């Protein structure tokens, strides 16, 4: 059965993994700036995941037996980990809250993302909430793109964003970050725990299963495969733009 051509994505993937931002995170101040931007990607990941949960599991009442139990279990396992993972201290925590803890530990500015969440809680649209947060255009573009896929994308497009934009790239991308951050020392153990946890989970099991899910939802259909490839490429380009926004701030541009 025909599947997504990963060779098409090699160039953009290499540009993302070779981005200069990784080498630039050489001071605590720069790591704080990175986290202020990146936390929005930590947040919007959950909307992609929740859309897949809606598509592949039964979340309605009255409940009816599901048809895709293998993939339903896979998605439910990821939800379990993302919303209630081990916190490394004997308790449980969502990965988003773990990231906020890491930000607070190292003194990163959490006000923008808190302003964003407060606006959402008051009924604001994502676009308006992003304006309230006062973050640069790179964050606006990244989150808006993710949310459009999560809310309006076809199942195979959501799966493409989930796999290529997150599960597939994260082990390599976070591997670069951990190496740079650990060399610098400082109060970053919660951040390193978060990064290593994702490297472990995504590299060992989540990534391969997410790829199988994508192939399943494409079903060998050339049009769906083309749409998935286009979505994957756009996701990686948006991540490059997001990193560009971080780089611009750390360099004072």
Image (tube, rainbow, N blue to C red):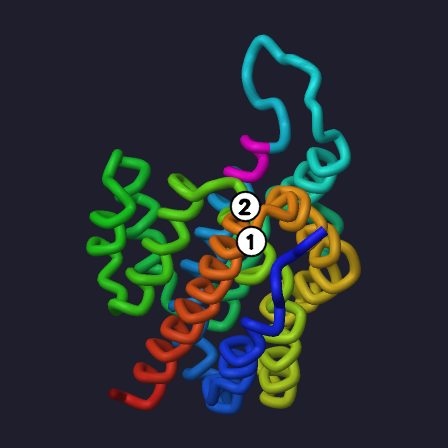
Extreme residue toward the top, this view:
62
Residue positioned 37% across, 74% down in the render = 241
Compared to 72, does 16 lie above or below?
below
Q: Quadrant of residue 33?
A: bottom left
Q: CA distance from mark 2 to mark 1?
A: 8 Å
**35 or 79: nearer the viewer:** 79
Taken as a whole, is the magenta stretch helix, strand or loop? helix
Question: Left or right of 89: which side holds 38?
Answer: left
Judge the density around disc 1: few (<14), some (14-19), many (≥20) Cα neighbours within 10 Å: many
Q: Under tag 2, what secondary structure? A: helix
Q: Residues within 10 Å of mark 2 (few under 14, many from 20)?
A: many
Residue 206 is situated, as x and y percent measured from the top left of the image, at 71, 54
Q: Position of residue 134 (x, y in %)?
A: 22, 62
Residue closest to the eye, 96 or 241: 241
Residue 110 in sight: yes
Residue 187 visible in image: no
Residue at 77% x, 36% y is: 70
Give the numbered dot on residue 156: 2
Q: How many marks?
A: 2
Q: Secondary structure at mark 1?
A: helix
Residue at the image position 65 percent from the left and 84 percent from the top: 179
Percent across and percent down for residue 250 are 35, 85
Tell whether position 54 is magenta.
yes
Q: Are marks 2 and 1 in contact (CB under 8 Å)?
A: yes
**6 vs 191, nearest the viewer:** 6
Magenta range is 51-55
* Label annotation for residue 225: 1
């Amino acid at each position: 059965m025909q599947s997504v051509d990963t060779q098409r994505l090699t160039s953009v993937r290499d540009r993302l993994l070779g981005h200069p931002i990784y080498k630039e995170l050489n001071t605590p101040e720069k790591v704080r700036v990175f986290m202020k931007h990146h936390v929005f990607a930590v947040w919007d990941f959950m909307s992609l995941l929740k859309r897949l949960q809606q598509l592949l599991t039964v979340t309605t009442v009255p409940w009816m037996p599901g048809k895709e139990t293998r993939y339903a279990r896979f998605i439910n396992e990821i939800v379990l980990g993302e919303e209630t993972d081990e916190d490394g201290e004997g308790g449980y925590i969502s990965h988003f809250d773990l990231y906020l803890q890491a930000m607070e530990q190292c003194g990163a500015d959490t006000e923008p993302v808190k302003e964003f969440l407060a606006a959402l809680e008051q009924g604001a649209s994502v676009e308006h909430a992003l304006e309230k947060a006062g973050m640069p255009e790179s964050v606006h573009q990244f989150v808006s793109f993710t949310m459009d896929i999560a809310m309006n994308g076809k199942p195979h497009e959501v799966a493409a964003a989930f796999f290529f934009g997150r599960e597939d790239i994260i082990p390599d991308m976070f591997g670069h970050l951990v190496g740079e951050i650990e060399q610098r020392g400082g109060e970053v153990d919660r951040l390193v725990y978060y990064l290593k946890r994702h490297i472990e989970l995504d590299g060992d099991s989540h990534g391969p299963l997410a790829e199988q899910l994508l192939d399943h939802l494409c079903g060998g259909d050339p049009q769906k495969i083309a749409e998935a490839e286009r979505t994957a490429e756009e996701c990686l380009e948006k991540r490059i733009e997001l990193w560009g926004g971080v780089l611009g701030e750390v360099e004072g541009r």
